[in-house]
């Protein structure tokens, strides 16, 4: 689909709900630029930048990085892609972050992946990640062609430190207390669209059809 105006979208859902997996499909089908807060933080940790050193312990413990650090980071990244449509993954994660985003940009739509916690726990223990690109694999769902190696670059895959069972529990708790209120925030603005299920392949056709309708209606308003 050819977009006539910049579209700004957010994807939400608990840890492991498939935000990264669905984002890759949205990027491919609709050409929005994907910005993942977690991928940016992990790249900084890997490169041992000041930001990486500052945030590593929060992430390893399954706690959120402070709002002011996150909002500054993501808003400055967004400024560099202002001319394009974008899809934010992992931000905003608190109401304060949502307000900081709202001060600068109006979000057109928020896709919420509603996946049961029980399903998530099983997935995260078998996730493998290609750190430089953020590509994710799963031993059962979408295994790499060669075990332990990224399909596109052949580079090694890693298991995230925060995918240990006890850290996953803490991440789910922080999602309930700090991030669920953001869903209410967007619901009250009339932009929240929720997709419920336990399998990405079954959720995806609904997300795709919704985005086709949504983006067509935005284009029509512009024309
Ligand atoms: P992240 O990186 O934003 P989370 O915890 O929100 O991390 P995560 O873990 O990256 O989310 P996801 O992107 O929702 O999960 O899910 P995914 O990677 O696509 O899928 C999970 C696994 O399931 C993969 O292995 C995938 O292949 C598999 N899978 C997908 N669909 C299916 C299916 O249908 N079936 C099966 N069997 N498998 C499937 O944030 C990390 C940390 O960074 C900090 C925090 O400390 C956070 O904990 N952080 C922030 N802190 C404050 N504010 C912010 N805005 C922050 N952003 C990040
Ligand atoms: Mg992710």
Image (spheres, rainbow, N blue to C red):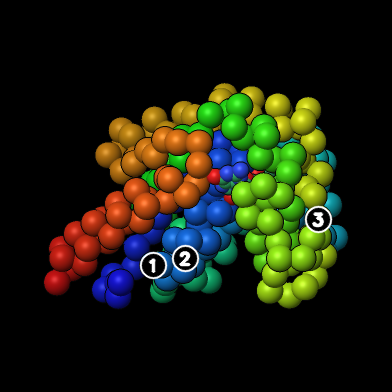
- Report the Cα–Cα distance between label 3 and label 2: 23 Å
Tell me if 180 is positioned left or right of 164 in this view.
left
Viewer-proximal residue among 164 and 92: 164
For this view, does 58 lie left or right of residue 20? right
Q: Quadrant of residue 118?
A: top right
Q: Which residue is mark 2?
A: 27
* Label 1 CA crowd tier, 10 Å (few <14, some 14–19, many 20+): some
User: Image check: 176 left or right of 137?
Assistant: left
Residue 98: x %, y % from top left? 46, 42
Which residue was labeled with disc 1? 30
Name the spot of residue 6 as percent of width and height, x first: 34, 68
Label drawn at residue 103: none
Helix or strand or loop: what does disc 2 sit on? helix
Q: Is residue 1 above or below residue 197?
A: below
Report the residue marked by disc 3.
158
Answer few, some or many: residues within 10 Å of disc 2's Cα (few below 14, many 20 plus, some between 14 and 19): some
Asked whether the residues under the numbered discs 1 and 2 touch, taking CB atoms below 8 Å apart as contact, a structural biologist would say yes
Mark 3 and mark 1: Cα distance apart in space: 29 Å
Residue 191 screen position, x and y as percent = 31, 43
Mark 1: C-beta under 8 Å from nearest atom of ligand 1: no
Q: Compare marks 3 and 1 and give the one earlier in the sequence.
A: 1
Q: How many marks?
A: 3
First of labels 3, 2 by sequence position: 2
Q: Could you classify mark 3 by the number of other residues whose Cα lies within 10 Å: few (under 14), some (14-19), or many (20 or more)?
A: some
Mark 3 vs 2: CB contact within 8 A: no
Q: Residue at x 67, y 47 (%)?
A: 140
Q: Quadrant of the N terminus?
A: bottom left
């Amino acid at each position: 689909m050819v977009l006539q105006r910049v579209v700004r979208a957010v994807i939400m859902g608990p840890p492991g709900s498939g935000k990264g997996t669905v984002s890759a499909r949205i990027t491919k089908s609709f050409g929005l630029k994907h910005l993942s807060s977690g991928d940016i933080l992990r790249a900084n940790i890997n490169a041992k930048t000041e930001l990486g050193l500052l945030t590593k312990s929060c992430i390893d413990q399954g706690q959120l990085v402070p709002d002011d650090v996150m909002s500054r980071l993501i808003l400055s990244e967004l400024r560099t892609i202002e001319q394009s449509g974008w899809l934010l993954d992992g931000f905003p994660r608190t109401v304060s972050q949502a307000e900081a985003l709202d001060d600068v940009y109006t979000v057109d739509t928020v896709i919420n992946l509603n996946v049961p916690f029980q399903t998530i726990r099983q997935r995260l223990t078998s996730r493998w990640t290609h750190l430089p690109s953020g590509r994710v694999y799963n031993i059962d769902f979408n295994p790499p062609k060669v075990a332990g190696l990224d399909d596109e670059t052949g580079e090694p895959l890693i298991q995230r430190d925060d995918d240990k069972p006890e850290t996953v529990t803490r991440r789910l708790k922080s999602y309930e207390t700090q991030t669920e209120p953001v869903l209410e925030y967007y619901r009250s603005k009339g932009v929240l669209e929720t997709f419920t299920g336990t399998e990405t392949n079954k959720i995806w056709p609904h997300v795709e059809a919704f985005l086709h309708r949504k983006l067509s209606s935005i284009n029509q308003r512009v024309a």
